[in-house]
Amino acid sequence: MMKSFIPAILISFVSVTLLAQSGGDSNLEFTKGKQYVITRHDGVEYIGEILNDDSHDILIQSKTLGNLYIPKYEIKSIIEIVDEKMIVNNEYLSSGPFTTRYSFTTNALPIKKGENYGMLNIYGPEAHLALTDNLNIGLMTTWIASPIVLAAKYSLKKEASNVNFSFGSLLGTSGYLNSFKGYGGLQWFNVTLGDRQRNITLSGGYAYLQLGNTEMAPGVYGPYHQEPPYELLKTIHGPIFSVASIFRIGAKASFVFDSMIGYFSFEKTDIEDNYIPSLDDYSYTVIRYDAYATALFLMPGIRFQNTDRRALQICVAGVSTFGDLNESFPIPMISWFYKF
């Protein structure tokens, strides 16, 4: 008798504890006519109106399964569905703070205070903290903790509007790589049309990058010209623009598109030689000139988000440069988002 009584007490204790963690207790009153999403510990979700709540079970009326009893010890969470547009194909659409993020760029939607998130990708970790409902800051780095980038974004409107604006900044240092000599930044402004489930964002800003190292331009010598070697500081800067979008392709999956195009200038050197017939020799001159290049980043991908606390995103990204630099190379991106 005692052996069977002890497990029963433990099960009752666990049931009450889990329900309390999900935001309710045995006396919780549910609003009649409201829809709720009930998630079990094994990940199974039920959507429906809660008809009855007793000390052991809750009774829900599901549109797909009819009336259904769910034992409380199986329940992980109970969430009221405020906007029924969040129900698609009888599945609940999760949101979360990382719905403000595409691949690299962000949209203008605010992160609510306390809704912090981290991101891990194959290049390094990130962490972003919401200090207020409109201001969030973040830190981005690589797995070797260098370079380091500080990010900040301020949203100008509440997300209830379908048009939102924000501005922000990225400030970075090369860190211990190259003895902190390198630095860079990006200041930007953007506008987002839509909501967290479907939106498009247009961004514009100005980027600059000081690599922190120098290149020795060669010294040249001729009968009429002499110039010693000198240091050429590598600096890249220019305007940058972005078009990004996200929209649902299922209850738990979204198509993500991110892009950036920048027009950058930097200094280069060349050597001009002039033949002197009377001396049967050449004179040489070092020519410094401004070079220009256009860089195009394309980052389409898919995001899988089962809950508002975590998501997985896979992008097939690539970079192409044109002008005085002509290169193309892939940048695969696999990212994990976590709410904390």
Image: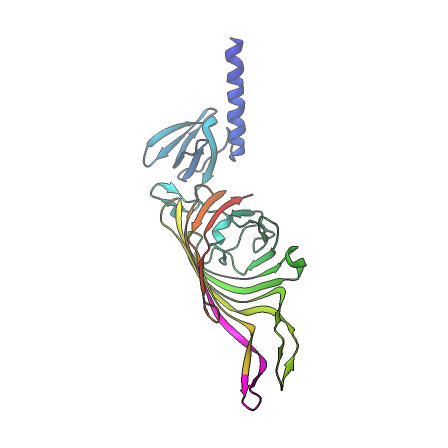
Whether residue 254 is visible, yes or no, is yes
Which residue lies most toward the top here? Answer: 1
Q: x%, y% of residue 158?
A: 51, 57
The mark total stands at 0
Identify the image quadrant of residue 67: top left
Q: Residue at x 54, y 64 (%)?
A: 188
Q: x%, y% of residue 281?
A: 57, 85
Main secondary structure along the magenta-highlighted residues: strand
Whether residue 162 is visible, yes or no, is no
Check the image and report above or below for 327 versus 87: below
Which residue lies most toward the bottom here? Answer: 278
Question: Does residue 210 appear left or right of residue 26 in this picture?
Answer: right
Q: Residue at x 41, y 28 (%)?
A: 70
Magenta stretch contains residue 291: yes
Check the image and report above or below for 340 versus 191: above
Q: x%, y% of residue 32?
A: 41, 37
Identify the image quadrant of residue 327: bottom left
Magenta stretch contains residue 282: yes
Out of 160 and 275, give the one closest to the viewer. Answer: 275
Q: The magenta stretch spans which residues?
A: 274-298
